[in-house]
Image (spheres, rainbow, N blue to C red):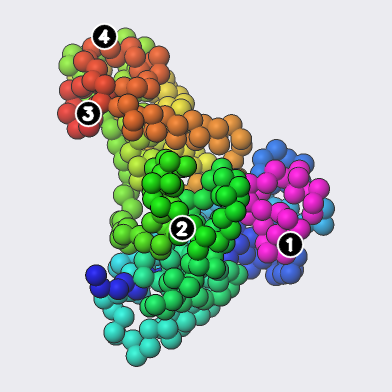
Amino acid sequence: MKRKFIVHIDIDAFFAAVEVLLNPSLEGKPVIVGGLPHERGVVATASYEARRFGVHSGMPLRQAFRVCPQGVFLRGNYHLYRSFSEKFFSLLASVTPDLEVASLDEAYLDLTSCRYLYPSFSQAVRSLKRKLERELGLRVSVGVGPNKLLAKLATNQAKPGGLMEIEPGEEKEFLHQLVVKHLPGVGPKVQTVLNLLQVQHVGDLWSFPRSALRSLFGLNGDELYWQARGLDARPVRFRRQPQSFSRETTFLEDIWDEQLLLAHLAYLCDRLAVALQEEALYTQGVEVKIRYADFRTETRRRLVALPLQTMGEIYRVAQDLFLSFFPAPRLALRLIGVKATQLTPCRPLALFKSLEEREEKLGQAVAELRRKYGFAAVLTMRERLLERCYPLEAKRGFVLKTASLTK
Ligand code: DCP
Ligand code: CA
């Protein structure tokens, strides 16, 4: 197979770096973004100066204050970071359309086809790095490799501020000395087991047959087997970010019962949340649409400060909007819908209360169960009211009139 040239680019200490750029008196100081020292919540990110004290993303703010009392604690400004992120991606889009948005401050570029346009590929990547840093005012780290996995691993080695290119033929040597926790498949649990087995470097994993890794770690073991060999077939996927997602349905018969209408709304929010989750997108605008029996249509929209993704979060806003249509001339409805507008690729988790983090974890657990047992495996009591109206299929959920809603 033809060797690819994949470039991975990641902004260093993103939120903290933006704060320092806008307030140069913070230069060289331990900057901690996520909240004030005694607030609930966790650190979103910390400058490299603060990391030296052991502060890291996800650490409770109070603990961060204990280990780094001299830190400059900032609440952060998501809109500001988002505008930097947009500029980052528009600069990259001018280089190649083969671009993948991996997160708010992280991108993959597939430069395989345009590699020969440059007299020196390495020079071209180097000058792209300089250009990004000049135009953004932020430092980036860059990795180059034959696939996304190796490019990202190279970036991590290059941090902060460096550039690392894994040349053809160097992959094995690079992996051999790499500390095993850098592989994406090695979380804390896997790492504990690997420690027990005295596996410290990726090279140590090579002596384990695939079957052994699979019996130790299940499907994750397979992943680990391929990752240890630097193999990764995932393409750089250009995804034009959708502007909005909506889910709506016309009823078999007009409905006036409020509980039944809310049950439909909950189900639609559920389907919408699944779509958002699949695309790894969050919404900052929720719109509810209703159509009365006489075809009059009304919509109401609310913008929210914190990006949402889970069904519970979206439903709470949608229910509020729905109830705000009433009291109205009580006519039965023939259609109801919900729409997510203002989509964004990333929610900076740490800026949010632990309650929302728990909801997000719950959302992920539900998605996992549904992958295994079908959509109907997990439904709320409210959604179950729909059993009165529609057949329920284990795999696909309710068979509504709107066929596209049943997958
Ligand atoms: N972020 C967050 N909560 C987390 C992790 C990250 O809010 N648990 C936010 C803050 C980060 C941004 O996302 O600035 C990018 O995340 P990275 O993991 O890329 O971390 P940084 O850019 O801060 O640091 P670096 O990439 O240099 O390690
Ligand atoms: Ca980063």
Q: CA distance from mark 1 to mark 2?
A: 35 Å
Tell me which residue sits at (76%, 45%) in the image.
63
Give residue 79's position: percent from left, percent from top. Answer: 53, 53
Q: Which residues are magenta?
A: 43-68
Instruction: Using residue 38 as the reference point, say whether residue 313 is left or right of it.
Output: left
Q: CA distance from mark 3 to mark 1?
A: 51 Å
Q: Earlier in the sequence, mark 2 or mark 4?
A: 2
Of residues 235 and 388, the one drawn nearer to the viewer in this rendering: 235
What kind of residue is marked 3? Answer: Thr
Which label belongs to residue 52?
Answer: 1
Please indicate, yes or no, whether residue 115 appears anywhere in the rendered image: yes
Q: Is mark 3 within 8 Å of ligand 1?
A: no
- Label 3 with label 1: CB-CB less than 8 Å: no
Instruction: Using residue 3 as the reference point, say whether residue 16 is left or right of it.
Output: right
- Kindly identify which residue carries mark 3: 406
Instruction: Using residue 354 as the reference point, say whether residue 362 is left or right of it.
Output: left
Of residues 285 and 50, the one drawn nearer to the viewer in this rendering: 50
Q: Secondary structure at mark 3?
A: loop
What kind of residue is marked 4? Answer: Arg
Q: Secondary structure at mark 1?
A: loop
- Kindly identify which residue carries mark 4: 388
Name the quadrant containing residue 99. bottom left
